[in-house]
Image (cartoon, coloured by chain):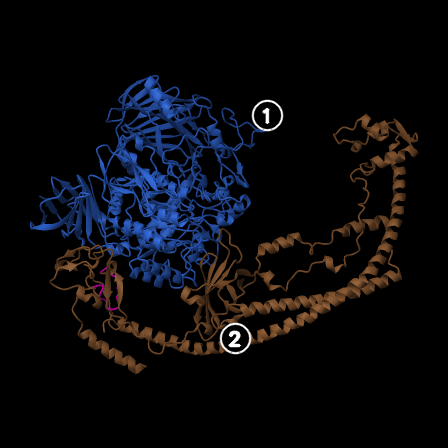
Amino acid sequence: MSCQYLLLLLLFGEVSSVEVQRPRGVPLSKRPLYEENKPFTCLDGSRTIPFDRVNDDYCDCQDGSDEPGTAACPQGSFHCTNAGFRPTFIPSSRVNDGICDCCDATDEYNSGADCQNTCRDLWRKEKESMEKLAEIAKEGFLLKQQLIQEAKRGLEDKKGKLTEVQNSKKDLEEKVEALRTVKETAEQPEKEAKERHLKAWDEQKAVIRMEKDKARMAEVFLELDGDGDGSVSVAELLSHSELDQDSDGSFTEAEAQELLGGVDKVDTAAFETVWGNIKEKYMSESNTDAPAPAEPPQEEIKEPASDVDSETYPDDDNPEEEDEDDEEEDDEMDDGDYKSPPPTQTQEKKDDDEEGTMPPYDEETQNLINVAQKARDEFDEAEKALREVDDNISNLEKEISFDFGPSAEFAYLYSQCYELTTGEYVYRLCPFNRVSQKPKYGGSETNLGTWGKWAGPEDDIYSVMKYEHGTGCWQGPNRSTTVKLTCGTETVVTSTSEPSRCEYLMEFTSPAVCQEPPPMTPDPDHDEL
Amino acid sequence: MAPVLVLWLAVCLSGTWAVDRGNFKTCDQSSFCKRQRALKPGESPYRALLETMELTNTRLTLQLINDNNKVRLLLELYRLQGNITRVKINELKPLKPRYEVPDVLVREPPTEPLSVLSQDENGVVLSLGAESQRVIVSARPFRLDIMEGHDVLMSLNSRGLLAFEHLRMPQQWQVVPPHPYPLQITAKEEEEKVEEGMWEETFKSHSDSKPNGPSAVSLDFSLPGVEHVYGIPEHADTLRLKTTDNGDPYRLYNLDVFQYELYNPMALYGAVPVMLAHNTKRTTGIFWLNAAETWVDISSNTAGKTVFGKMLDYVQGSSETPQTDVRWISESGIIDVFLMLGPTPKDVFSQYASLTGTQSFPPLSSLGYHQCRWNYNDQEDVRSVDAGFDEHDIPYDFIWLDIEHTDGKRYFTWDPHKFATPKEMLQGLLEKKRKMVAIVDPHIKVDSNYKIHNEIRSRGFYVKNKDGGDYEGWCWPGSAGYPDFTRADMRAWWASMFAYDQYEGTMENLYTWNDMNEPSVFNGPEVTMHKDAMHGSWEHREVHNLYGLYVHRATAEGLIQRSGGVERPFVLTRAFFAGSQRYGAVWTGDNAAEWDHLKISIPMCLSLGLVGISFCGADVGGFFKSPSSELLVRWYQTGAYQPFFRAHAHLDTPRREPWLFGPENTALIREAVRQRYTFLPYWYQLFYQAYRTGEPVMRPLWVEYPQDPATFAVDDEFLIGRDLLAHPVTEEGSRGVTAYLPGKDEFWFDIHTFQKHNGAQNLYIPVTMSSIPVFQRGGSIIPRKLRVRRSSTCMENDPYTLFVALNTRGELYIDDGHTFNYEKKEFIHRKLSFANNVLSSVNLAPDAQFTTKSWVERVVILGASKPGKITLKTADGEESQLDFEFDASMSVLTIRKPGMNAGEDWKITLK
């Protein structure tokens, strides 16, 4: 290789010494269009001018073609030959502006700028770095072949495993169905026994409640009967404005009388009917701030929830659900049917206070419960196992169908994470999953985006990864990260930056992006030769 | 930037984008404003004691007495050179001296003789020298009328709202107690009512101890025949000031207002207490020299009238002439007011310039395009943005670094990781002939490991709190001290900190930006300093509006000194006061990416130009929020035709360098910036003119067409100098604009198509996204450089194209672009004129000397007819024939490559 390079240099020396004369700033390829001593036609054909107006520092052609070597035309361009390096065009506005643009210094022929010819230096440096890159590419490309093989094997493994798991799923489904029958069979007698027990308890409670109500009625009667004449009068009732029937703010005599059943006063016996009308609203004088306990809601007293069917488990294992965005998760939490305590608990407690605890189940019932519980547990376990298998299947399917590159060369990154520590933060890239940032000295992790898509240019789509919908920014977008992949022999995050607020850029090297190096030295494009 | 940290919460709570008005006082919440505004007109207690009148040659003094409390005031009246009358009113014997604003006037204004014309027991008539001007001093009640011939130009205290709260002994009791007997009788002759807020007032959680008690001053001015008043920036409002009867007065109190609202009289970052009054006959100005919190009320007898009503008055010969009444109220200090009596707008500019100086002459490069963002993250970021401009072939001169470039918001330092080798970075820019601005704010981090802080503390240079300790507030760095810039020794020290060996990592192409110099104090009352903080023996109350000017001044002096007095400084400031024009540029603060903010940039900069501050601009693109690409393009097109042309963006907005919006928008922005660069010779010449005369660079139409009432309220278009009229597109989705082209018998040439339009008409101009409606006045010659390069410095030696719009005169100014050598007469100043088919260049400054490599590459004559031949005669007497082209459809004659040096005499003859 180095021999060839030397040869090239020698060749160059030859060529530049016999360079063809042409107007300043014109590339060799366009030389024939600038024929000395003949009228010059602007390259866009717009007009023809005498040749002495070419490069006379006045713009005559709209397209700038009459001034290839001066700064006179706003649209013009100047050709740097850059012998020894790569020729290039610069905008005319950079001719004689005092800044060295062409490495052969030809753009500054009249500005007094002290420009050196740096073309050979540049070429040497570029060659060195290209050689280095080529070496890396070569090594990386070999590694990539291994990765592709591994991915192939991995894919086969996974496909095999999928079949295996799908088969085991069938067995499991059968088992679940069988256990469901067992469970349902055991639950029927359990239910009946429990209902019997409950009914007995309800009856007992009703008796207790009635007694309590009677006692309270007597108490209230005494309380109402202010003058102790053994009867409650309209006047006595009037002091309890909370009994106002139509709640219009005034408790009238008529209303009170109506409560007493149309009479002026009632005795203990007649009060029983009255009591029925007023006990909901009545407030005891001795304890006015707490309304008299209303009749406890006549709802069924639920046993402590052990009924599996009514419970929802958080579906942690389903990765598809995990992919859903945060907002939805929040909503779910608001619904909170599995996270908030069962609503009946407090009520039960109150009942316990008033009417005592429900007596334990008798032995027979308890036995039935135990049998049913065992059946339930076994069923649950089997069902859980089935769910796990389902998850397993969907995970495998997802991984199998995931776009890991044309030859699945990026598959090895799946479920890996790579870190880079900077001055302030530790950055963490988990390819195909998420990017995050954590302060080095304590503080919580910030999500810089979850896997979005391959986002390289059309012809090189696997050169860029995009992670989106990270934690939101104040006045800004949700955080997102662009990961640029370059060829390297190692898989490393080499740098991170935040070019724009909350838009991160990560440089990531991997052999998986290495292309087969071109067969030989990338020569500069010498159209001069 | 704005105090995001503090006000963040407010925004979150209110959930809107508008300013949180509750953070700033209304007149009712400012006790002196409330007290003063409660006074009723027509009940003046002041009487002139004519027997106390003393008249030396140039100074008249006279005592005034307040008949209610017998306190005497001393009135001083001076006639100043250049048709200015100065009226000063102070207490005759104040308990202690009252604050008189120093350092704003460029010198003690030279006076002219005054003489008594007549006198009786009711008053005195004084002659104001030339122009048959007189002052009538009426005794009872006291009143001043300034007359010219039979016309009253201006009356003072004509509504009897002169008020002067005299200094008094602190009361033992603080608030009027509902107490039958005062606990102690003071030595004063009589009791005065003590109102709440006189001796202490609170706003939100902030308490103002007010140890000196009430000290407000106020005076009213009547302007007969006036319906249009302008000035008193800074407000986000129309060019023509509105009447304030139905709301708060215009407020002047430098404040860091987070997300300011448009079209209201709230105070903003700067204050220039100068108002201009204009009608078809005369322009006058009032300069109220007071640096304390000030409110200005405006009312008008025609304000409520419809056009029809006014016409009816006219037809019926209504006896009432239109009149505008103005009232100034300041919290403290004295009344020191300069009545600038015109009569033309340009006379008022030169009168004001004679008092406070002119716009500093900026380096040429600072008139180019500035690329700014909060923040360019590190040196690599700067390098790649710089490269982006080259890649997309967009010129720029300055790239800016906001607060994040520092080491922990310690100004004069660099972040050791992100900007580890600043000189390398600056050298890289220098090699492309470009420059940088880095921010230096006046709040100094309290940190014993920070050299700047330690030096200021050990020298005792910090502002003190009311208890004598160093005043500390909360700002970007956290706890911060505020250097006392009112001290000359402090300013000298501050200036010395810009020396290359002090401010490490700096080079000659680094310039400075002073932000937050209202001063902004995140946890202070109204986000600024406590009024009872102390600057030596003066309260902050007295000097508040002056603080920003002093910061700006000290910084500009630092930049001059670091080059040994050779190089011109460039310093941008957010806070300002009368006189700030002497120190550099200002911008309109933290605007937003909204169409209305683009629109308001025009009246805001026009208002500043009227009061001397020509170097004004608004953040292109809008600071807060993110502009649509249409808004961004329109903003570049507008900014390219405003004096200070800088794009800026908030930290939390997406990047918006000009090439990030697709190739079409990049091309539109490139074209707008390039147009700016082609006009740099004209901008530069206008700034030279502003520096010499005080005339605004960007000016309202009425300044050039003072007799055309159709121009008086125009603020969606403007003139650049006299000869360019810009009507940028500031409406979303616009398909056309209607521009008013002023001047009967005048012509205007579209600068893009060269189409000729008649003056005194409303012209509808269809527009596309590439349109920037701009016109060159017929009768002008505008020198341009059409070879746009990477930066203005790269264009130094480039040839000129002269755009000659018949019939004609113009000027050309050339110097080295960056030093003070123009003060040593090292420049070229030429008069260009076209008459009788001869275009010639004549030296306007024969005693000046400078050589340029620039030549004239092209002359474009608009509105020409086709000549037979064209000859050039150069200084050495040689004659040659020139080539030309003639476009008959637009009557445009282009003379090809005359080639003469731009600094020499020459003549081009069309035959």
Quarter of the image with the C terminus of chain A in it? bottom left
- Identify the residue at the far bottom of this view: A3
The magenta region covers: A96-108
Q: Quadrant of residue A316?
A: bottom right
**Dot 2, crowdedness within 10 Å: few (<14), some or many (≥20)?**
some
Q: Is residue B70 above or below residue A324?
A: above
- Residue drawn at the location 81% of the way across and 49% of the way down: A350
- Residue drawn at the location 27% of the way across and 66% of the way down: A88
Magenta stretch containing residue B736, yes or no? no
Three-letter code for the amino acid on which mark 1 is drawn: Tyr
Magenta stretch containing residue A101, yes or no? yes
Q: Quadrant of residue B91?
A: top left
Disc 1 element: loop
Relative image position of residue B622 (x, y in whole percent): 41, 47
Relative image position of residue B604 (x, y in whole percent): 37, 40
Label 1 sits on residue = B181
Q: Quadrant of residue B133?
A: top left
Measure the alpha-carbon separation of dots 2 and 1. 99 Å
